[in-house]
Amino acid sequence: MAQQQFDPDKFIGREYEQNTFRELLAFSGDERLLLIQDTGGMGKSLLLQQFRHLCQIATPPIPATLIPLDQLSDQHPYALMAAIARDLGEHGVQFTRFNQAERVRTRDDLTAVSPSSSFHSSEGQSTANRGDDIRDTGETSLVEAGDSQPIRTPQQAFFDDLRRLEQPVVLLLDAFERASVTLAQWIADSLPEAVNIQQQTAIVIAGRQVPAITGPAQRIDELTRWERTHVIQFLDRNGYDYTARHLEIFGQMADRGMPPSLIIQGVNAVLRRPNR
């Protein structure tokens, strides 16, 4: 998905979080899930962009997708699966079965998925905004016109494709607190299955709230705060002209544990960069 321009050379701090992520990429321990929770403005979104950069510069590079959940086309789990398949497909990771099943599901002459699929109510009404249980029952299949072989539902096909991957992949999900009830439930209940069936799949979920997930997972409940050294790095890397008095003002903001976003706003309100 489209992201705001990110310059890894200007990323500041968060060494502990980056090292934790690097350990996740080693795929050597039991944990394949990393949950990152903190208040707004602390830099969770930038951190996930840095994580994606670490995947890009890994040897060999690791396909990774970064998806802000509040920017999905809709809040149904199928939209998230489609975004993952599309983004990873740009890195050569094929979701052939899912794409086939999704084409059938969205076909104009396909009236509905069988009522045995728990993505739909008994009346055929979508449950995407109702918070109902949206996990597949394992009994539903779709059939292409003229085909005798059933196609597994998109969710089943999605996990089939993951199971067959021969390379590691990383899923980075941002703004979990903005997901719908149904999508949040699917992420908490069904998505962790990905790491059970494909041991080289790592998932990072970040937000002001994070799901309660059973099983092995690492948690970061508060990002490391900026210190004065981080303020200096920010000013220098972004070309600001500043004095010792300026540094004292912004350093005090860091000492108070203020979010980096507020410190940056203060810098922009007081200083000008010469290259603007």
Image (cartoon, helix red, strand yellow):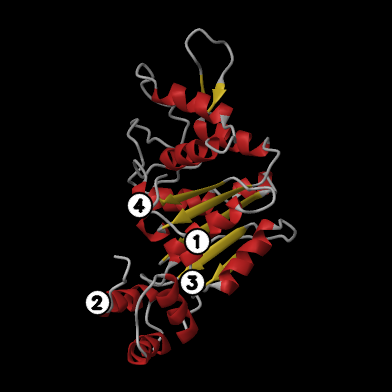
Cα separation between marks 4 and 2: 29 Å
Q: Mark 2 points at which residue?
A: 269
Asked if marks 3 and 4 touch (Cβ < 8 Å), the reply is no
Q: Which mark is residue 12?
A: 3
Q: Earlier in the sequence, mark 4 or mark 2?
A: 4
Please name which of the two marks, 3 or 4, marks the residue nearer to the observer.
3
Q: How crowded is mark 2: few (under 14 residues within 10 Å), some or many (20 or more)?
A: few
Q: Earlier in the sequence, mark 4 or mark 1?
A: 1
Q: Name the residue under label 4.
A: 70
Please name which of the two marks, 4 or 1, marks the residue nearer to the observer.
1
Label 2 is placed on what type of residue? Ala
Cα separation between marks 3 and 1: 9 Å
Q: How crowded is mark 3: few (under 14 residues within 10 Å), some or many (20 or more)?
A: many
Q: How crowded is mark 4: few (under 14 residues within 10 Å), some or many (20 or more)?
A: some
Q: Name the residue under label 1.
A: 8
Quarter of the image with the C terminus in it: bottom left
Q: Earlier in the sequence, mark 3 or mark 4?
A: 3
